[in-house]
Amino acid sequence: MTYPGVHAVIFHRLSHALWRRQWKLAARMLSTFSRFITGIEIHPGARIGRRFFIDHGMGVVIGETAEVGDDVTLYHGVTLGGTSWNKGKRHPTVASGVVVGAGAKILGPITVGEGARVGSNAVVTRDVPAGATVVGIPGRIVRKREADIDDQQEERRRAMAEKIGFDAYGMTPDMPDPIANSIRSMLDHMHAVDEKMTGMCRAMQDAGINICEQKLPAIKDELGDPVTEEARNT
């Protein structure tokens, strides 16, 4: 009853219906009234999907040719704006499941892919792939969904992390952290080296060379104590 984001969406549904019936003056008057009482400006021509949610909402602006999918969340100060006065498509298309942080600006006839995340105060003027995370001015992709990774590779990463006594998976997959990405690549590389070393040891044993019987140095924690299997599990 008191949430401006809900009020703005309800008013937009009504004004959009009027706009589609070519009652454009009535549609614009209703959208102007909605902006006056909610602080949210949605052009009646914008097409918005189901379960659209505006949190706080003050200062949100959505242009005439913008298209918003289902289950999209916008925070306050977000702009889905245009970069020209040319007729036709000049505002962004935001696919389903996208979250746009406070103060972000998405400008021009670009597409933000499904499930993408746009960081607070980012300025996005280029297409964003599905599942990507964009931050900064100008917007840059800091994380892209790994579509080609399989369950087996993910399980190998976990096993290698446990082997070296490091929990890389305390960091959530959604965290846009280049260090986390580097660690994942390092774990993949270490697994490949492990497999190659195992194969070399087998070949050397077949040749009668038993150098691989030597044990590797123990992995120690930050205090210099050996990392036990029990410590890794806790």
Image (tube, rainbow, N blue to C red):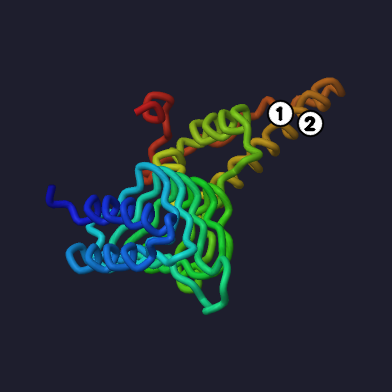
Q: Position of residue 210 (x, y in %)?
A: 76, 25
Q: CA distance from mark 2 to mark 1?
A: 9 Å
Q: Position of residue 164 (x, y in %)?
A: 51, 36
Locate residue 115 relative to residue 50 in the image: left or right. Answer: right
Toward the viewer: 77 or 9?
9
Toward the viewer: 202 or 149?
149
Give the crowd class for mark 1: few <14, some 14-19, many >=20 residues within 10 Å: some
Say which element carries label 1. helix
Mark 2 or 1: in front is: 2
The reply to whether residue 206 is visible in this rendering is: yes
Q: Which residue is mark 1?
A: 212
Say which element carries label 2. helix
Q: Position of residue 234 (x, y in %)?
A: 34, 28
From what the image shows, is residue 149 above or below residue 94? above
Residue 227, image quadrant: top left
From what the image shows, is residue 107 above or below residue 5? below
Residue at 51% across / 62% down in the picture?
Answer: 92
Residue contact between numbered discs 2 and 1, judged by CB atoms under 8 Å: yes
Residue at 41% across / 30% down in the picture?
Answer: 232
Q: Position of residue 186 (x, y in %)?
A: 60, 46
Residue occupying the far right of the picture: 207
Locate residue 9 relative to residue 19 in the image: left or right. Answer: left
Residue at 39% across / 57% down in the picture?
Answer: 100
Locate residue 85 relative to residue 190 in the image: left or right. Answer: left
Give the crowd class for mark 2: few <14, some 14-19, many >=20 residues within 10 Å: few
N-term-proximal mark, 2 vs 1: 2
Toward the viewer: 222 or 173?
173
Toward the viewer: 190 or 76?
76
Residue at 66% across / 43% down in the picture?
Answer: 189
- Give the amino acid type for the residue marked by disc 2 in the picture: Met
From what the image shows, is residue 178 above or below residue 136? above
Q: Which residue is mark 2?
A: 200
